[in-house]
Amino acid sequence: MNRKILLGSIYLFAVCMVFAFVTDHRWEDWYITFRASKNLAMGNGLVFNIGERVMTYTSPIGTLIPALIKYLLLDYSDDATMWAYRIICSIVLALCSFPLFRIIEFFKLNRLFYFLGILLLSLSFIIIDNTINGMESAFMVFFECYLIYLLITKPQNYPTKLGIIFAFIMFSRPDGFIYAGAILLGFSIFSTLPSTQITKQNLTNLLYSIFIASIIFTPWFLWTWYYYGTPVPHTIIAKSRTYNIEYFINSFINYAKNFKGSSDIYLAPYGENFGGWGLFGLFARGMSLVSLFYWVNWKGNTIARSLSFSTLAMILYLNIVSGQGPAPWYLPAVAGPSIIIWIFIFSDLKSLIPTRTFYLFPIVFLGILGANFYFAMRMIRAQQRIIEFGNRKEIGLWLNKHKSAHDTIFMECLGYIGFYSELKTFDFPGMSSPEMVATRKKLKTNQYGFLIQELKPTWISIRPIEIENINKQVPNLLSKQYHLVKIFDKRLDVAHAKIKYGQPYLDFDAVFYLYKRL
């Protein structure tokens, strides 16, 4: 292996491992997926609730690999599975150094741009965090980078390799074809490379690649259809909307009216939603506007323009179609191609200004990203310690200790509480619960008060703002049909943590009220 590729891989792997040791971050959705993975490893089937065939996960890779690890480590704690999965994901992300290097090499750019790309990747908080927190994001980023490398270089056996990558992208996420399609669309519009032009031969190669991908992915598709009764993950069913032309037109108009960039690509989780990031938020917004709209620069590098259009298409998909715009575990799929965009933006910039002056730009740029990464890491470390381990996990453990047979629980936070309580869950919007989805359709509402009144869960775990809303929707529901059992309050711990940036994110989950049905 080329020495520079090896050094880049070792560096990326080390960054991931250091980040994991410092924060020990475990995303909520890890425990949603891992509950099914653990059940499979223990012989109970690939299900969330034993005996209930509901697909409560989206990523086959992110579910089957932890299941295999747990099966091999049955005599060890669940933490051992988490760390083994982290190591695998970190290795996968580290492999991004190969396609990055080959892309730089293909365009005969200065090798400094390769190291710039590695640094940008290592300072992408949304990518590094979602590599070690239990999500499948590292696989998605690597397969996207490899797809871009294939489209640019067109190596030997190109159609077959392209088909294999298409299949792996689908195994990473069931909507992976959207991201791959966005990349193909961007290249077909802006790239001047022969391998990406719309020609009869290229279309033939593409159809062959899709055929190869279908052969690889179809067995999984058919098995899930047989096992669950549908190949569509229940998480997607729960979050789905009623789509029609009017919906798309109104959504696009509303989104365009309020569009201010997509700063969450470059910030900590939900940084734009909760705020508290000061100048870092403005910098991230500026970065997103440049990378998302670089395609309008008709004099810019055609690869950067292609990927810029692709990432804009991905953002529109996330915000208008799927409704998961700010969701941190989706954004690495946008952040990965964005890094390649920035490599070519700096390459274009270098050709326009004197060399000595040019180097100030990446130095300042990396310095700001580094500071943002440091403060985001501090925030997520406190969030894991105070909110995830200190609050949500404790709620689950407390419920496990005080539950009775056939108890059920209503909550929005499914991960930690669902995993550690081991209860039958009525989560909102119903990722683990067909009953919740059916009730929402029956009542034609998403208001918690009416859903709780209909489902009659034994336990309710809710935030203060949710209590206010329930009392407005169904007065006396909580006071007459339920009684307050316990309050889990970490507001003082959040205040004492003295987080400089991002504290509103922790404040949102600092207090939970636990009710039990009378």
Image (cartoon, grey):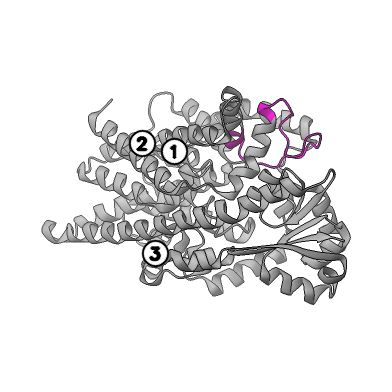
Q: Quadrant of the N terminus?
A: top left
Q: Which is the main secondary structure of the residues drawn in magenta?
A: loop
Disc 2 crowd rating (10 Å Cα; few below 14, some 14-19, many 20+) is many
Q: Is residue 399 positioned above or below 353 on the image?
A: above
First in sequence, mark 3 or 1: give its number: 1
Q: Is residue 262 magenta?
A: no
Mark 3–mark 1 distance (CA, rounded to whole Å): 23 Å
First in sequence, mark 3 or 2: give its number: 2
Q: Residue at x 34, y 47 (%)?
A: 122
Amino acid under disc 1: Phe
Q: Secondary structure at mark 1?
A: helix
Using the rendered view, name the quadrant where residue 361 is placed.
bottom left
Amino acid under disc 3: Ala
Residue indicated by mark 2: 99
Q: Nearer the viewer, mark 2 or mark 1?
A: 1
Q: Position of residue 451 (x, y in %)?
A: 82, 62
Residue indicated by mark 1: 142
Range of magenta residues: 40-63
Q: Secondary structure at mark 3?
A: helix
Residue indicated by mark 3: 284
Disc 3 crowd rating (10 Å Cα; few below 14, some 14-19, many 20+) is many
Q: Is residue 402 left or right of residue 380?
A: right
Q: Position of residue 265 (x, y in %)?
A: 45, 57
